[in-house]
Amino acid sequence: MRVAIAGVPRAGKTTYTETLEAECPDDTLVCHTDSLIYLGWSGASAQVATLFSEEGPLIVEGVAVPRALRKWLAAHPDRPPVDTVMWFGDPYHELSVGQRTMGRGCLTVMYEIVDELRSRGTAVVGL
């Protein structure tokens, strides 16, 4: 299983990932992109993009995922980055202005890449 979980802030991405992680084999590589925010937007998404080239089971989640997918797709035009991308677009809590802006940016990037993901055989759920 190779899954990328993207979406707006406070929509349950981390909670869902923790549920998946509990059911996965021990060798599953799991990345919560919030832990890379110290790298900045570009640095975090570049770091996450490298994970899509790793072999084996993978779960990557966070607001940096759409930009990471876009970078990976541009650099690897011949294969899918993951089996499934899940989009979480409905926040469970009120968002700040900055969080709403971030969510709109993530959605914009997802709309830019969704057709390419699907053309390579990646299932896109929730978008």
Image: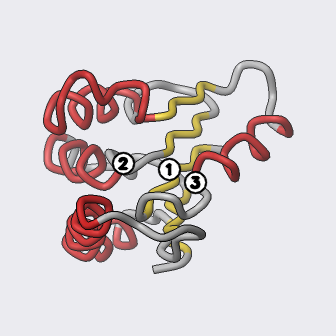
Contact between marks 3 and 2 (CB within 8 A): the answer is no
Residue 113 seen in this snapshot: no
In terms of sequence position, does the residue under pointer 2 or pointer 1 come before the other? 1
Q: Which residue is mark 3?
A: 13
Amino acid identity at mark 1: Ala
Q: Quadrant of residue 25?
A: top right
Amino acid under label 2? Val
The residue depicted at 17 percent of the width and 31 percent of the height is 40
| Disc 2 to disc 1: CB gap under 8 Å | yes
**Residue 121, relative to residue 125: is it above or below?**
above
| Residue at position x 59%, y 29% in the image | 30
Mark closest to the chain's N terminus, 3 or 2: 3
* Of the two numbered discs 3 and 1 in the rendering, the one whose residue sits closer to the viewer: 3
C-alpha distance separating marks 2 and 1: 7 Å
- Tell me where residue 123 appears, x and y as whole percent: 52, 68
Q: Is residue 78 left or right of residue 83?
A: left
Q: Which residue sits furthest bottom?
A: 127
Which residue shows up at 66% across the image and 45% down it? 17
Using residue 7 as the reference point, say whether residue 45 is left or right of it. left
* Kind of residue at badge 3: Lys
Quarter of image, res 18: top right
Determine the secondary structure under disc 3.
Answer: helix
For this view, does 104 lie left or right of residue 75?
Answer: right
The residue indicated by pointer 2 is 65
Q: Is residue 107 above or below residue 50?
A: below
User: Residue under circle 1?
Assistant: 4
* Residue 29 visible (yes or no): yes
Task: For the C terminus, give its image quadrant.
Answer: bottom left
